[in-house]
Amino acid sequence: MRLFAVLAALCLLLSTLAPARAAEPIKLGAVLSVTGPASFLGEPEKNTLLLLQDQINAAGGILGRPLELVIYDDETDVNKCVLAVDKLLKKDRVVAVIGPTVSGNTLAVMNKFPAAKVPLVSCAAAEKIVQPVNPWVFKTPQSDRQAVARILEHLRQAGLSKVAILTVSDGFGQAGRAVLAEMLPAEGFTLVADEIYGPKDTDMTPQLTKIKGLAPDAIVCWGTNPGPAVIARNRVQLGMDTPLYMSHGVASGKFIELAGEAAEGLLLPAGRMIAVDQIEDGNAQKDVLTAYVADYTARFSVAPSTFGGYAYDALALIKAAIETSGSAEPQAIRDALEATTGFVGATGVFNFSPEDHNGLDPTSFVMVAIENGGWKVLR
């Protein structure tokens, strides 16, 4: 009788533990530049993840389990980013990681993920993040090559052939510079100047003065705030009317705020989120973007930026991968991510494959001009 009683108690204990185990959270990590120079990128990313976490859990979680996000701020510092990633992988034991925010930090940590066998979905743009393909690394922003392709298409339509480039010396700028230097001559354009500035420089007059003397048809600047805003102001101060194209790295209201009136007339490729009210009916992204922008604005009293959309896609893709595979194990998430096709996100329609861990094409961009302190989509 005593043995029977012990077995009965054990069965009762297991039956009470089973529901608790089923409700164990799915723990995802994120390392973002919430503060520091890239905070205008990282803050909307963090806000977006918190918004989605609450929405997902309110809807019953993922596979019936609550979502738990562990978010660290790398302060836009590469060393702090490395430490945060180590903590996520070794201490927090997360099943996937979102971020980092900037390309340099992503390039510094991405090789940790094959060893840990945990998937990373970066929110940074540099093509080097996914070329060559790292089996455990994906990214949601469009690649530099796609942005350059849209700029060259616009240059060609405008009949502009002599181009000067002005790039920042950080990871994002170096990656963009390499693609520009490759694609401009390959597409029949003449590269007349190749100038560089530092991420902390506050006056780019010397580079622009040199470019002015070479009389290009257009200038392409590749960087993120605040440098491009300084360049926009310096261009006006020098009385230059040469068309100035920016990269998708400035596609936020913060850039217009920093550049002020000097931003007027500037051109850049950007995701459709930048002008939700101008998305054409029937576009696959319209419903996703409309709902995201409305929910974010209601919670944070400000509209999200393109960069928040990168985090939106990273978490939404991981959630879909877990649901598709029916597992929250890192290997299953990685495999399902790589097999994802036709996924409509905030940035574009993703079609991953073993050869493509970005999954986007140039159609995920629209060309916009800055007019009257806002964005105008060019048709």
Image (cartoon, rainbow, N blue to C red):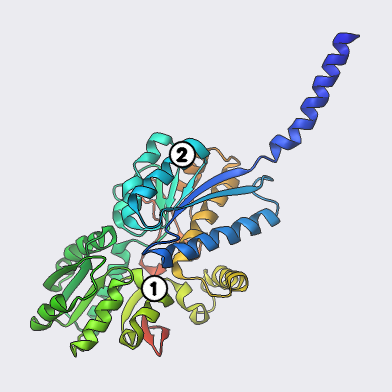
Residue at image point 42% right, 35% down = 116
Q: Looking at the image, is 104 positioned above or below residue 204?
A: above
Q: Is residue 179 left or right of residue 109?
A: left
Are there few (<14), some (14-19), or many (20+) residues within 10 Å of tag 2?
some
Q: Looking at the image, is 337 positioned above or below residue 281?
A: above
Q: Quadrant of the N terminus?
A: top right
Q: Is residue 5 left or right of residue 73?
A: right
Residue at image point 38% right, 38% down = 114
Q: Residue furthest right?
A: 1
Q: Is residue 268 left or right of residue 118?
A: left
Measured from the top left, where is residue 51 in percent x and y? 60, 61
Residue 374 seen in render: yes
Disc 1 from disc 2: Cα separation: 32 Å
- In front of the other: 1 or 226: 226
Q: Are marks 1 and 2 in contact (CB under 8 Å)?
A: no
**What secondary structure is found at the residue carrying circle 1?**
loop
**What secondary structure is found at the residue carrying circle 2?**
helix
For marks 1 and 2, the one nearer the N-term is 2
Q: Amino acid at mark 1?
A: Ala
- In front of the other: 12 or 145: 12
Q: Quadrant of the C terminus?
A: bottom left
The disc at residue 89 is 2
Q: Which residue is mark 1?
A: 251
Measured from the top left, where is residue 367 in percent x and y? 36, 77
Q: Looking at the image, is 280 positioned above or below residue 97?
A: below
